[in-house]
């Protein structure tokens, strides 16, 4: 029962995360013809799915603890601050590359 519920939760959380990640890539590029975005999204998705499958089999407790994603999961104030900045910088890493592609997905808009 525990593992089935955990597997369902992991599938839902991973699916939502990957959809949001795809939206971040392609909305920032304002195009689905963003080849680099598709390549990165596919490779990243494959790695996330592989890690989910591995840890559900090897350490389901770790997955259970990691399903709570926020700075509220940390007890120390310094760790909450680090977690918050880490989340913001990670978000920026997914959004900013899309700004530098044109609407066709080939030419650089800002030449970054």
Image: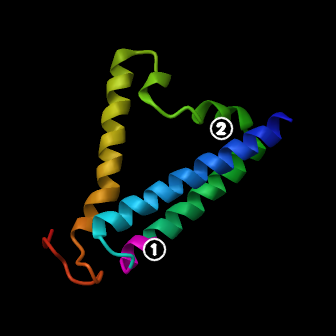
Q: x, y percentage for residue 28?
A: 29, 64
Task: Depth check: give the residue in front, 26 or 88.
Answer: 26
Magenta stretch in the rendered image: 33-39
- Name the foreground residue: 72 vs 104: 104
Outermost residue on the right side: it is: 1
Magenta segment's dominant SS is helix
Q: Is residue 63 left or right of residue 3?
A: left
Q: The C terminus lies in which quarter of the figure?
A: bottom left
Quadrant housing residue 32:
bottom left
Q: Position of residue 51 (x, y in %)?
A: 63, 52
Residue 39: assigned label? 1
Q: CA distance from mark 1 to mark 2?
A: 26 Å
Quadrant showing the N terminus: top right
Q: Residue at x 45, y 74 (%)?
A: 39
* Of the image marks 1 and 2, the number of the one nearer the N terminus: 1
- Up the image or down, 13 lies above or below 73; here it is below
- Could you say which quadrant of the image residue 65 lies in? top right
Residues at discs 1 and 2 in contact (Cβ within 8 Å): no
Residue occupied by mark 2: 63
Mark 2 residue element: helix
> Which residue corresponds to the image point at 37% horizontal and 81% vertical from the top-left?
33
Q: Callout 2: 10 Å neighbours few (<14), some, many (20+)?
A: some
- Taking the spot 68% from the left edge, 42% from the top edge, the residue there is 9
The label on residue 17 is none
For label 1, the SS is helix
- Left/right placement of residue 59 relative to residue 95 reads right
Q: Residue at x 56, y 31 (%)?
A: 68
């Amino acid at each position: 029962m525990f593992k089935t519920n955990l597997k369902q939760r992991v599938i839902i959380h991973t699916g939502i995360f990957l959809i949001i990640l795809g939206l971040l890539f392609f909305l920032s590029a304002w195009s689905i013809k963003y080849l680099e975005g598709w390549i990165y999204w596919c490779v990243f998705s494959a790695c996330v799915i592989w890690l989910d499958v591995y840890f559900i089999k090897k350490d389901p407790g770790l997955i259970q603890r990691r399903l709570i994603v926020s700075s509220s999961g940390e007890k120390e104030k310094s760790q909450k601050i680090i977690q918050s900045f880490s989340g913001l910088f990670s978000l920026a890493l997914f959004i900013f590359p899309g700004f530098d592609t044109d609407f066709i997905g080939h030419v650089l808009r800002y030449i970054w």
